[in-house]
Image: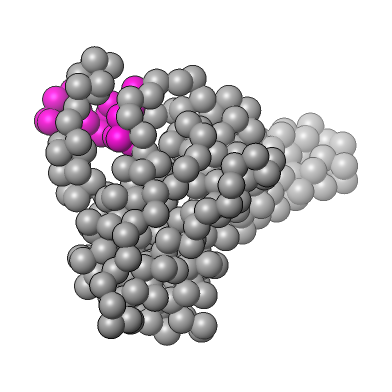
Amino acid sequence: MARETLPVALDLMFGHEGGYVNVKSDRGGPTKYGITHTTLAAHRGVSSVTADQVRRMTLQEAEAIYRRSYWSQSGGDILPAGLDYAAFDFGVNSGPTTAVKNLQKVLGIREDGHVGEQTAAAVSAYPGGVQKLIRDYCDERMRYLRSLTNAKTGFPANGRGWTIRVTGKDPKGQWKDQPGVVGNAIRLANAAHATIPTPPALPIDAPPEADAKADVRDTGVIEIVKKPEAWGPLGGLLSAGAALTAGSGPVQWAFAFAMVAAVGVGLWYFVHRVREGK
């Protein structure tokens, strides 16, 4: 639907997805043009690639990877102009499935990670239109980023760069204000309804940590247990606690302890599923 956005989206992407990086605060490991070593290996059909192979990756190969593995999977050919770019950038930074699920969360529909007819219909019917949806989506993206509480690779380490990337505002006020993803996305949405050509891209100027991958595996446990799906196991834990305090017989105590163990295992699997993006 908005395939014409892709060249501009790629210009914007290469503006803040810099050259070769390999820093401890980035879960992606060796990365160039925002393409991690695992993504490059998958694209080439091999089990792994070396850091040097990542370093020597060409811009043309990176563009081919973005076109095949990120643009379409993030809904780029279905979503309207502007929103397609916002989802694309989110997908590059956090994975297309995470990007789409967060969009579907904003839309209030089933979060299956795939952009299809239901998602497209919900986008068209969104109160306030595409511009409002872009703003709400970027707000949701910031909430997601703040939920990544790992001190070494999550928001504590990379939050400033991610904030500049998405909002264009530096929390410390040292980098000048700029459009950010939200501003560029709205600009593209406006251009799609204008009679003038799409204006030149405005690459985002941000510190290196803006390129760090925002990985769902860094989601904090507190954020996970806030999810409604966790309330069932937590309710079981309360029931087990009540059983422990209400009785004194060995059978009742054994049953209560078994309930606590089962609930603990259930919570562990739930945390694991969330962190694996399932």
Q: Is residue 46 magenta?
A: yes
Q: Can residue 109 be seen in this snapshot?
A: yes
| Magenta stretch contains residue 147 | no
Tell me which residue sits at (59%, 30%) in the image: 157
Q: Nearer the viewer, residue 180 or 42?
A: 180
Residue at the image position 49 percent from the left and 54 percent from the top: 180
Q: Position of residue 65 (x, y in %)?
A: 19, 42
Whether 248 is drawn above or below 189: the answer is: above
Q: Decide which of 59, 251 is in the foreground and name it.
A: 59
Q: Pick the quarter of the image with the N terminus.
A: bottom left
* Residue projecting furthest to the left: 45
Instruction: Residue 187: give x, y in percent of width and height.
Output: 41, 68
User: What is the number of callouts on the image?
Assistant: 0
Q: Identify the colour scheme used.
A: one colour
- Left or right: where 29 falls relative to 207: left
The part of the chain drawn in magenta is: 30-48
Give the side of residue 28 with respect to residue 248, left or right: left
Q: Is residue 49 left or right of residue 243?
A: left
> Nearest the camera: 273 or 134?
134
Relative to residue 14, is residue 112 depicted above or below? below
Tell me where residue 171 appears, x and y as whole percent. 67, 45
| Residue 79 quadrant | bottom left
> In the image, residue 207 lies at what x, y percent?
51, 34
**Residue at image x 24%, y 23%?**
54
Question: Is residue 180 shown left or right of residue 175?
Answer: left
Asked whether residue 268 is in view, the answer is no
Give the residue drawn at x 87%, y 46%: 246
